[in-house]
Amino acid sequence: MTNDAVLAVWTDVASQGEVDFNDWYLKQHVPERVDVPGFLAGNRYSALAGRPRYFAWYPLRNVDVLTSPAYRTRLDNPTDWTRRVMPHFRATIRSGMAVRHRLGRGRGGVAATIQLTGHSEGADDLVAWLVGEALPRTVLMPCIVGAQVWELVPGAGGGATTEAQMRGTPDRLVERAILVEGGDAASVRSAVNSCLPPAALAGFGAEGRRGLYRLLYTL
């Protein structure tokens, strides 16, 4: 099942609401999202290193799913449990993104993300390097099962919905992101450090906020 887009979400959570937040995410939120037509799966993680502490991504049939009536209805009609949890979100980054390039198959138990910013002038050269050199090297590293490059689609996040307003502060966006998946933390960390080092990204004018995450749940 091939997806052309993803919804990617990174967030922290207030400590007093964290237990409820995690239970809600696993038992209600991911299943609720995957039940929306066009959402193909849901994957949720917690941080081994880096921030924000939680990361989730949802493969989508296409980016139009994020502006569909079915999804908009869900965002504007949150459940009672969602209403209780949403105010505990902190520093949320939420972006509807096109899949620019993908290598490998399956999910890894550990994922690294790199949120890329500050590279507008060198964006084409950066993506060409990622697609032509960096990611092909990455997936050849031991225990790496896949890598992807995602690119922001402006206006695809859903806008000023009821759920977004309950989070208190506006969601931030990320221009591009890299996902690398593998079987264990040491292998993923080594692959990212070797094939996607900060100095190489800086050569294209890019800064990368890095996180290393373990898979909690996939549906």
Image: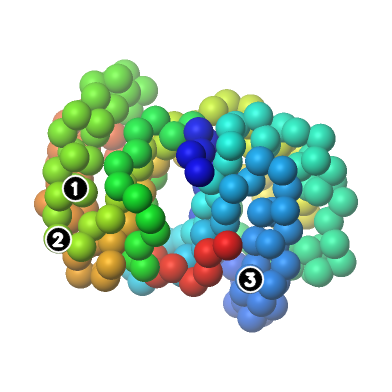
Please identify the quarter of the rendering in which residue 91 is found.
bottom right
Q: Where does label 1 land, which residue?
A: 138
Tell me which residue sits at (58%, 37%) in the image. Answer: 61
Counting labels gives: 3
Give me the C-alpha separation between circle 1 and circle 2: 9 Å
> Residue 142: which numbered mark, if any?
2
**Is there a contact, CB below 8 Å, between mark 2 and mark 3?**
no
Q: Is residue 75 left or right of residue 188?
A: right
Please identify the quarter of the rendering in which residue 65 is found.
top right
Return the x and y of residue 214 as percentages of the image width and height.
40, 69
For label 3, the SS is: helix
The tag earlier along the polypeptide, 2 or 3, is 3
| Residue 90 vertical position relative to residue 171 in the rendered view, above or below | below
Position of the C terminus by quadrant: bottom right
> Residue 57: which numbered mark, if any?
none
Q: Please, what is the three-letter code of the amino acid marked with disc 2?
A: Pro
Q: Please, what is the three-letter code of the amino acid marked with disc 3?
A: Leu
Give me the C-alpha separation between circle 2 and circle 3: 30 Å
Please identify the quarter of the rendering in which residue 14 is found.
bottom right
